[in-house]
Image (cartoon, coloured by chain):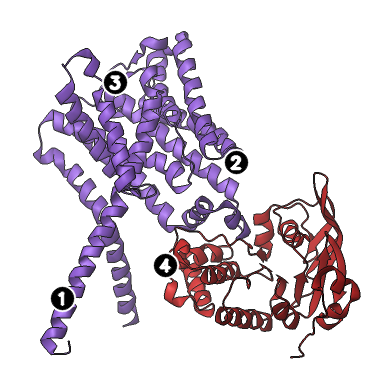
Amino acid sequence: MLLELTSVSKRFGGLTALRDVDLQVDENELVGIIGPNGAGKTTLFNVISGFYRPDGGAIRFDGQDISGHPAHAIARLGLCRTFQLVKPFGNLSVLQNVTIGALNRERRVERARTVAEEIIERCRLGPFRDVPGKSLPIGLRKRLEVARALATQPRLLLLDEVMSGLNPTELHEMLDLIRELHAGGLALLVIEHIMAVIMPLSQRVVVLHHGEKLAEGPPAAVAADRRVIDAYLGEEFAVAEA
Amino acid sequence: MNRLLQLSTQHSALSTRLRRHWPAIVLFGIAALAPTFVRDAYLLDTLVLILLWGALAGAWNVAGGYAGQVSLGHAAFFGLGAYAAAVTAIHWELSAWLAMPLGAALATLVGLLIGYLSNRLRGPYFALATIGLSQVLLIVASRWRELTRGGEGIPIPFRPGFENLAFATKQPWVYLAVLFAVLVYAVAVYLESSRFGYQLAGVREDENAAEALGIDSRRLKVIAIAVSAFLTSILGTVWAQYVGFVDPNYVFSFDLSIKFALMTIIGGIATGIGPFLGALLITLLEAYLRASFSGGPAGQSGIYLVIYGVALMLVVRFLPRGLVLELADRFRWRRRARRAEAQEGEQVAAGTH
């Protein structure tokens, strides 16, 4: 098991953002996380990636206990996350942005730049390599966010709504990229709002509701789950069989 | 053949590097050659001050520019370096070369403390804390009379000779100032090209994003601030030896802290050459204003501060990224326009237009 959460909780004052959440991600697995706004999806990412300290429970990555470790230490172990509100280094070029990511694994700047250039091509950011992060439109910023995270050469990538706000073309490019990464052996944990996107993409879906795990299983089973329909989907969602 | 190819790529890498650094090479080159054709002591004095202020601004730039931790209390580190020279000279007749590491060690410790604060306080709160620090040191230096002779200051006993870091003529001072200026510039070049520098740029832009990419942002900030304090203190010692008098109300003053920041911001923050351009501009401006307005009615003696302020406002309004980047952009733009024109000309000549 690559990532394993056992009854993880997180409270903010009187508000319980996460309650006893269990979650597993296997090597090269693609797991989707869905749930209504405020369900605790992003909090879950913040807890896993070390930005929040869990109030209870244990998080193990690759057999190692990482609960409460600082974010940078977790990233160094090969667990990298993106931010829902993308955080490009605004005054730095796309190439510099991605190079800084690549320095997670590479000691030498020249080597890191080579890695970055490769990833920029793979993410189809080639034409924008010298453009400063702040000048990119949102679709490209999301792609930069993914490229920079990829450059850290993670074993598990946490993607926080990287597909929302994209136009149909961008959306398909992002989907292709994610599929390609998965096919390349990467494990992914993906938060997404758009059902039509996340359901066919995921091997397994976890539904969060009020900070608790409501359901978990193959997309088709989850979509047919009465509790999920009541709490979140509102109506039955037909999973198109790919 | 392979070897030849390797050599030629090495050569081209070197030449692009030289091209990137031509303003520094020109500036420091002229400064280093100046004593051979300039004899005027006033001009050489101005040159030494430009180089020292430039180096000090460059030292500030390590924390305030590259790490994005804007300090308004760098006079604290400067004063520690200056007092290290003065106190050890009057009490123990120590050479300034020995006082230098002493002051630098002390400043580095204080820098680590400030670095720790930078992880607790952000933006204006951090700047306020640094002001507080320099004010505390000002009070200590003014009150601890047995050690510092208090508010009257310390004239540094003049014992000329390289071993005491004191010279009777300006020439050696110019060479020394160039040396320190190049040292500080080299630190900036390192911060623009190394792994540490890249990661620090990430921290400056967005600490959370940097953390997510495996960067220990707190550690990097503390190191940058400590290095900045270290360099500032060393230059404080050099400055004290050059000027020969250490006055607590000057070396620990808020004005001085502002000056380091101002010269860097005007010249170009987080650039290698910017602080030196800022120092050049401000030092010349100050010298000119002081010459033109001193001797006037007493009420006008501070007029240069007013003009200072106006200059800063103009820069922030019209050259917000500092002289270096704005000039570089304009220069590049003109070159590009010229190239485009030339291309168009060729096309017209070839009849393709």
| Chain letter tied to red | A
Q: Is residue B239 above or below residue B322?
A: above
Q: Secondary structure at mark 3?
A: loop
Q: Position of residue A157 (x, y in %)?
A: 68, 69
Q: Secondary structure at mark 1?
A: helix
- The disc placed on residue B119 is 2
Residue B334 appearing in the image: yes
Mark 1 → mark 3, Cα distance in angstroms = 57 Å
Q: In the rendered image, which quarter is residue A224 located in?
A: bottom right
Tell me which chain the residue with mark 3 is part of. Answer: B
The residue singled out by tag 3 in the image is: B244
Mark in front: 1 vs 3 = 1
Mark 4 → mark 3, Cα distance in angstroms = 50 Å
Q: Nearer the viewer, residue B51 or A130?
A: A130
Q: Colour of chain B?
A: purple
Q: Position of residue A217 (x, y in %)?
A: 86, 77
- The three-letter code of the residue at mark 1 reads Ala
Tell me which chain the residue with mark 1 is part of. Answer: B
Q: Are marks 1 and 4 on the same chain?
A: no
Q: Secondary structure at mark 4?
A: loop
Mark 2 → mark 3, Cα distance in angstroms = 37 Å
Q: Is A227 on the left-hand or right-hand side of B11?
A: right
The residue singled out by tag 1 in the image is: B342
Mark 1 → mark 4, Cα distance in angstroms = 26 Å
